[in-house]
Amino acid sequence: MSKVFVLDTNFTPLNPIHSAQARQLLRNKKAAIFRQFPFTIILKKSRPDSRISSLRLKIDPGAKFTGMALVNDSTSEVVFAAELKHRGFAIRDALTSRRQLRRSRRARKTRYRQPRFLNRTRLEGWLAPSLQSRVDNIKTWVKKLLNFAPIQAISQELVRFDMQLMANPDIQGQEYQQGTLAGYETREYLLEKWGRQCAYCGVKDVPFQVEHIHPRAKGGSNSITNLTLSCEKCNTKKGTKDIKDFLKKDFSKPLLITANGHGSRQSCRIDKYGFPNRHVPREKIHFGFQTGDIAKAVVTAGKKIGTYVGKVAIRSTGSFNISNKNGLIQGISHKFCKRIHAKDGYSYAV
């Protein structure tokens, strides 16, 4: 289970604590909730000086998802885990649609004009918007976690170039298994990648066996990405179990983070042909709420009596919609709503 982040009265990160300990501090009114996602509390009185353990932030970047984990280097304990879902493909599709609509509109509404190729220049270090979004998401969350946890080091998985493919563009299939990573070099690569210790129990200085993360009996491949190092005891214990079942007790339940962006800058919405069909109000905040806030609504009267927690969509009339895992609840008065997390461009789930 992921631990709870703690800040002292000066907003300095302290050692993360167990959720039961955090509940006790809140119950005794010795702390207050500072942030809901990731859940963070702040102490009301300074604690006596205590030793703060240094944490390492490990990042596994990807095109669709990026994995993040906070690990205590001294105990190898996973303190916090999160899975960040990027919106790069959504950005790419939106830019493609906008470009197609713009070209179609120009062809219909204007006379032919000479193409202008030099009226836009790209700065040095320019990245495509879809890729820049992924970079910005990771940087944003690294900065957030630095504010909530005593992080002293950051590690990121680096991808090796496929030197065999560069040397031989026609290489395929079994030739990879007999290439430069076969045999001894495969074992040396795994020893370096997994820190010369068992990937499951962390034991060192014992004979290791090359183990398939996803068992071959269940369709696992011999790819280097599916191999790890294991001591004989863990290898025998795991057998053909799925990795999730084998490590079920050791898994920290990750916080699922989805990048949604901060909305659109369009002053009006358009139909599928690129023509405006409705106006977007300039006012973004009504009754202290804005669309995208996470709110808790305790409805005590009317047909929708109950408690609802989810993302809110505002209206100037004060009748809001709340979207949660159970669906969309419409027509909730702002009087019943309390904001628990301000809009920050992300949605959260556990």
Image (cartoon, rainbow, N blue to C red):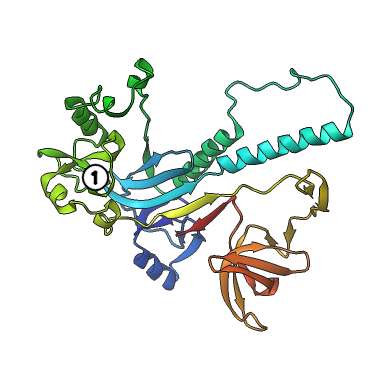
Which of 70/52 is in front?
A: 70
Which of 104/252 is in front?
A: 104
Q: Residue at x 66, y 83 (%)?
A: 303
Residue 153: horizontal and vertical position, in percent?
36, 38
Q: Is residue 92 above or below residue 239?
A: above
Task: Determine the image quadrant of residue 113.
Answer: top right
Which of 117/266 is in front?
A: 117
Q: Farthest top residue?
A: 167
Residue 276: horizontal and vertical position, in percent?
82, 47
Q: Is residue 346 above or below residue 93?
A: below
Q: Residue at x 28, y 44 (%)?
A: 220
Label 1 sits on what residue type? Arg
Q: Is residue 175 left or right of residue 104?
A: left
Q: Is residue 181 left or right of residue 288?
A: left
Which of 217/306 is in front?
A: 217
Residue at the disc numbered 1? 216
Q: Is residue 196 left or right of residue 116?
A: left
Residue 161: horizontal and vertical position, in percent?
37, 24
Q: Residue at x 79, y 43 (%)?
A: 274
Q: Is residue 190 above or below residue 150?
A: above
- Is residue 10 among the parts visible in the rendering? no
Residue 140: horizontal and vertical position, in percent?
52, 42
